[in-house]
Image: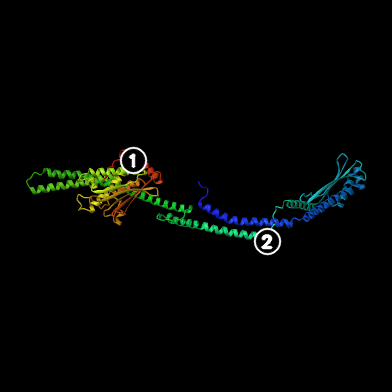
Amino acid sequence: MRLLGRTERRVILAVLITAVIPLVAAILMARAMIARVSATAFQPEFGAHLDRSLEVYADLARTIKQGMRHEAEAIALSPQLAKAARSADTSALTAELDRAFGAHPSLVALAVESEDGATLGKRERERPVDPAAERTLTVRKSLGDTEDEGPALVATFATSNARFSEMEAAQTFAQAYHQLERHHREEYVDLAYTKAFALLFGLTILAAVGAGLVVGRPVARRIGKLAAAMRPVAAGDLSVRVEEEGEDEAADLGRAFNHMLAELERSRARVEFLRRMSEWQKMARRLAHEIKNPLTPIQLAVQECHRRYSGDDAAYRRILETTNEVVMEEVGTLRRLVGEFSSFARLPRAELAEEDLAAFLREQKDHFAASAEGGSSDDVEALLSRVDLAFEVPADPMPAAIDREMLHRMLTNVVQNAAQALRDARPGASGGKLGRVAVTAQRDGAGFYVITVDDDGPGITPSLREVLFDPYVTTKRDGTGLGLTIVKKIVVDHGGTIEAKVSPLGGARFEIRLPRAGTPEARAAIERAARTEADEAPSSRRGASSPM
């Protein structure tokens, strides 16, 4: 499976083309800039000045710390403070610490500790030390002018953190500069190069927009047409179609959309036809019942009148005989009509199984040939013997889901219909051939097989083609109008379609489309047949399977 579709690949290619060209130019310009900046910016004098600046900051820090130590030493040399500490005079010690705090504003804490580390007195600043803004230094000095062991002064000073932060920042900058000086890798872009990059970036955007318009606009236009076609479909109009142009995913979507609508149209027509078929079968069942019941009493009554007359009136006897013959003939016609109504009302569902449609059609060719050779002057076989019937079937297998018996009945009805049309169109032909009937099978590119039955008869008028498959519609002198209805029912049960068209031979053409095995249409037909067959009694499976 491809990770990227055709449209995605085209967009990616366009973006690559528009991005690689400015990228190469930017690399060349960057190399030139690095060389120029390296030659002008990284001078030895710059590093020396930075180092001297750091030395100044270091001297300043040392001076501040040294001043704090001198202040602590000056406080520790106070005789009064030393005397108060040695005499453990708390009030005097506190007064001296307060005086020292007033004289030295940088003090944070000031304490006097004994030899063993105990705090004799302590003074702290009210405001605590802020580590973010101040740096502290703690100095310890012996009290008095001697270095002998005794009380000691512990002074904590605080100073502003600004100078020390500046020194650390200068150290960081100097280190970074020396790193750049050693490697010469970092880019420093002046205003001219900034403008050049901005211009290059703008051109890249324009190129990307242009490529997007060239590639994306046709796809967006087709998708827009598809969206516009959706609105009438949502309103129930399934005749809408979109143009199938291009070879990308948008074109595939359009073809799939058209195929979906065609399938929906076929499904809607199939459902509507089956619904009407159900109503027609109910009506045929009622008609057969209503007609069949009075036939036997009528026939027996006329026969009884004819049998019981024993008079000598020859004219009256002839009337009785004529009446008896007419009634018997018409009762026979009505019985045949009732039988066809009953057969139509009990029309079974197809039991579909995968077969070779080509082999089946070749068998039908042999069947028709044998029937025509053995027919009499009064049956259908005799009629078929007077027709030049030809089959054209591919030699390759044509796998399809079919019901052989039902499909045989369908083909027999269609061929018989064509033969009757030839007979009615040429009543003067006696003994000779009535015309030609050609049965052809072939594949199409949409997953269907097409079976056509052509004749060179009078054809079918356009107004009749719309209702030709409805019950009781016939142009034959001895037809009931049920044969083609049964044909369409069988075709629909196979998941196919049938249409009446104009034949290249000059007469009528019946075009039958049956789905190939394994296609969605064939699978759906098999599922429908399985569902409906489960609702039918096994004994009624072939209650009306004899061909008409």
Residue type at numbered disc 2:
Ala
Residue pictured at 66% horizontal, 57% vertical: 29
Label 1 Cα neighbours within 10 Å, binned few <14 / some 14-19 / many ≥20: few
Element on which disc 1 rests: loop
Closer to the camera in the image, 127 or 311: 311
Locate residue 245, reporting x and y percent. Answer: 45, 56
Label 2 Cα neighbours within 10 Å, binned few <14 / some 14-19 / many ≥20: few
Of label 2 and label 1, which has the lower sequence position?
A: 2
| Screen quadrant of the C terminus | top left
Name the residue carrying label 2. Answer: 192
**Toward which corner of the image does residue 342 lie, by quadrant?**
top left
Closer to the camera in the image, 138 or 27: 27
Name the residue carrying label 1. Answer: 536
Q: Is residue 131 above or below residue 33?
A: above
Residue mark closest to the camera, 2 vs 1: 2
Q: Which mark is residue 427?
A: none
